[in-house]
Image (tube, helix red, strand yellow):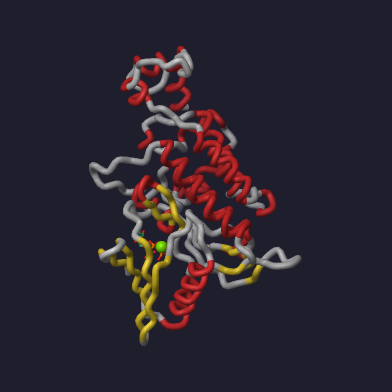
Amino acid sequence: MMQVILCLLQDVAIKQLDRNGVQGNREFLVEVLMLSLLHHPNLVNLIGYCADGDQRLLVYEYMPLGSVEDHLHDLSPGKKPLDWNTRMKIAAGAARGLEYLHDKAKPPVIYRDLKCSNILLDRGYHPKLSDFGLAKLGPVGDNTHVSTRVMGTYGYCAPEYAKTGQLTLKSDVYSFGVVLLEILSGRKAVDTSKAAAEQSLVAWARPLFQDRTRHSLIADPELQGQYPPRGFYQALAVAAMCVHEQPDMRPVIADVVTALAYLASQKYESDAEKVQSPCLDPGTPTRTKGDKERKLNGGRGSERERTRKLK
Ligand SMILES: Nc1ncnc2c1ncn2[C@@H]1O[C@H](COP(=O)(O)OP(=O)(O)OP(=O)(O)O)[C@@H](O)[C@H]1O
Ligand SMILES: [Mg+2]
């Protein structure tokens, strides 16, 4: 259960753990241990904790914009959907948090519970990973995996980990791919309200990865076509590699960071922004015929582009 209270010096969020015996207590200890040792701008800060009798409380810095999930799914009326630049900023920041756990922490840490509700947003949509109760110290020496009970969240769990319980850094990369797909598509990792073929995001998206003419079917309708097609294709390619069935074929998180940091640095100007600042400065690239066509039909893309989307 999560409560948010106001302290004199800083806003904090307090998590009261369910009093459910051994597992709850273990998660509490792991959370406190991990967050006391690990510090990075893309990890949430633990301010304090309380263990008294069977009461277990965790006190975190307050993340004013909630979780990524709150901004992607079931938006309340009037809540603005995330724009393209913000989505890329969130994806790149979350990948940096994971890179810290995998590559900078000694020994490496496998996060095991990467999902949109565990990526919290600070002011300016700065993302921070939270909830380390399931985290595991990664393999050391020549070992490539640690064996463990299968835990985590359905829909984000790498298939080989679900089958064998063998946990590797690549299990986290798979979960990251699912998160990236959610950010690009606005769909949930698992959505039982959809038709059977569309319930699993990965199973639904996989056949579409191969066919470039159908990529726009994956794009979140809330983006209203306001994204760079090339950047979208590149981000989708990263997601496709991360959710590869074979763990060895998935990229290491450092390469994901490089790709997403580049995409986040390429600021996309929406049609509305272009209309608001029509004065061209000397550095502004000349408008293309495609741009003009998009404007003329209300920002919905050229006739040819729209036909392609409908295919
Ligand atoms: N530090 C925080 N600041 C502000 N809001 C927070 C903070 N931590 C969590 N929340 C909010 O509380 C919600 C619930 O978090 P919680 O970790 O209890 O559950 P969950 O992430 O949805 O699921 P799980 O229990 O599997 O982690 C989050 O989705 C987020 O909106
Ligand atoms: Mg959580």
Residue 20: x and y in percent read 40, 80
In-image side of 110 versus 93 (left or right): right
In depth, the one of 310 and 174 nearer the eye is 174
Q: Quadrant of ligand 2?
A: bottom left
Looking at the image, which residue is at 29% across and 63% down? 9
In-image side of 110 versus 31 (left or right): right
Looking at the image, which residue is at 58% across and 42% down? 238
Residue 172: x and y in percent read 57, 57
Residue 155: x and y in percent read 49, 56
Residue, far front: 9
Looking at the image, which residue is at 52% across and 54% down? 97
In depth, the one of 161 and 51 nearer the eye is 51
In-image side of 217 versus 259 (left or right): left
Residue, far right: 142
Residue 168: x and y in percent read 64, 62
| Image quadrant where one finds the N terminus | bottom left
In depth, the one of 305 and 63 nearer the eye is 63
Quarter where residue 136 is shown: bottom right
Q: How many marks?
A: 0
Quarter where residue 10 is shown: bottom left
Whether residue 270 is situated above or below residue 109 in the rendered picture: above
Looking at the image, which residue is at 60% across and 72% down? 148
In-image side of 7 versus 165 (left or right): left
